Image (cartoon, helix red, strand yellow):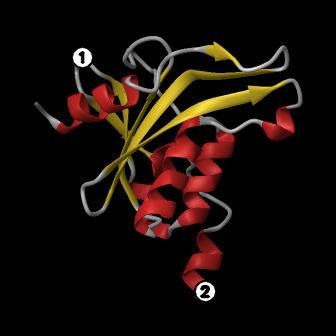
């Protein structure tokens, strides 16, 4: 089993869409991240009627990694809704992209799976070219 299949299957365990209340739904988008140590952490999306309270699966997975391992650097990430990423799927939203970039400078090199069948990936830095925060990291 390759790493992408392992990550996909771990994240898939979290996929069981449910309505928590008339205002909140969860487990309808899932993700897995791999830390530098090779451990895999999962997360699921939780969304409410007020967007301010939403948490994306990708950020929840990263927070699980940080809470359990104390690390902020992510090697790989996969996210999906009701099936594996296909074509140009599995892309983190803008808020997640920004969060990962701010979490650790090395996260610009996160491999994001965009097609499960072909194992095509894209690097986070290619999704955020000319990122505004580079200067702050470089001035450190």
Q: Is residue 92 visible?
A: no
Left or right: residue 77 compared with residue 43: left
Tag 1: Cα neighbours inside 10 Å, few (<14), some, or many (≥20)? few
- Disc 1 or disc 2, which is closer to the eye? 1
* Secondary element type, mark 1: loop
The residue lying toward the viewer, choosing from 94 and 134, is 94
Residue 78: x and y in percent read 39, 34
Q: Which mark is residue 117?
A: 1
Q: Residue furthest right?
A: 50
Vertical relation: 139 (above or below) 129: below
Vertical comparison of 1 with 105: above or below: above
**Image height check: is 66 above or below 95?**
below
**Residue corresponding to mark 2:** 139
Q: Is residue 1 left or right of residue 64?
A: left
Viewer-nearest residue: 57 or 87: 57
- Residue 130 found in image quarter: bottom right
């Amino acid at each position: 089993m390759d790493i992408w299949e392992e990550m996909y299957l771990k994240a898939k365990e979290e996929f069981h869409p449910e309505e928590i209340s008339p205002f909140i739904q969860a487990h309808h988008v899932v993700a897995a991240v791999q830390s530098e140590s090779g451990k895999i952490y999962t997360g699921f999306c939780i969304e409410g009627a007020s967007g301010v309270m939403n948490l994306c699966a990708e950020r929840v997975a990263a927070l699980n990694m940080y809470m359990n391992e104390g690390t902020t650097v992510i090697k790989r990430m996969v996210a999906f809704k009701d099936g594996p990423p296909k074509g140009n799927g599995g892309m983190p939203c803008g808020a997640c992209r920004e969060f990962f970039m701010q979490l650790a400078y090395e996260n610009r090199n996160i491999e994001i799976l965009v097609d499960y069948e072909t194992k095509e990936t894209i690097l986070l830095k290619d999704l955020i070219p000319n990122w505004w925060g580079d200067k702050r990291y470089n001035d450190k």
